[in-house]
Image (cartoon, rainbow, N blue to C red):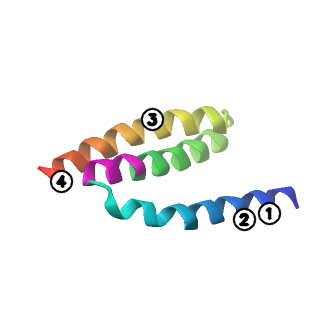
Amino acid sequence: MKKSRIAVLALAACLVSAPACTNMSKTQQGGLSGAAIGAGAGAGIGALTGGSGTIGALIGGAAGGILGGIYGHSQDD
């Protein structure tokens, strides 16, 4: 029951914050998207390999944010 509440709150946060991305540059969008994808992938990989999902999410989010920002910046130019 507690997990379903967290999932509903996370979904609500995503839906509320989605319109905020419309005025972002491609660098900002790439960084944000990369961080979100990297955090999800890092958490999943960390949990599947028996490591810490939290540490995986932090490392994946940081790496994804940097790489997404670099990619988005190249699209801006």
Q: Mark 2 to mark 1: distance in Å?
A: 6 Å
Residue beneath the point at 65% across and 65% down: 12
Q: Are marks 1 and 3 in contact (CB under 8 Å)?
A: no
Q: Amino acid at mark 3?
A: Ala
Q: Which mark is residue 75?
A: 4
**Which label sits on residue 8?**
2
Residue 31 sits inside the magenta stretch: yes
> As displayed, is residue 66 above or below residue 44?
above
Question: Pointers 4 and 3 in contact (CB under 8 A)?
Answer: no
Badges 2 and 1: C-beta atoms under 8 Å apart? yes
Q: CA distance from mark 4 to mark 2?
A: 34 Å
Mark before the other along the chain sequence, 4 or 2: 2
**Which residue ends up furthest to the right in the rendered image?**
1
Residue receiving disc 1: 4
Disc 4 is placed on an element classified as helix
Side (left or right) of 50 relative to 19: right
Q: Quadrant of the N terminus?
A: bottom right
Give how far apart the Cα atoms at labels 4 and 3 are.
Answer: 20 Å
* Highlighted range, magenta: 26-32
Which mark, residue 62? Answer: 3
Between disc 1 and disc 3, whose residue precedes?
1
Badge 1 local density, few (<14 within 10 Å), some, or many (20+)?
few
Q: Please report whichever mark, 4 or 1, sits nearer to the chain's N-terminal start.
A: 1
Task: Nearest to the eye among marks 2 and 1: give it.
Answer: 2
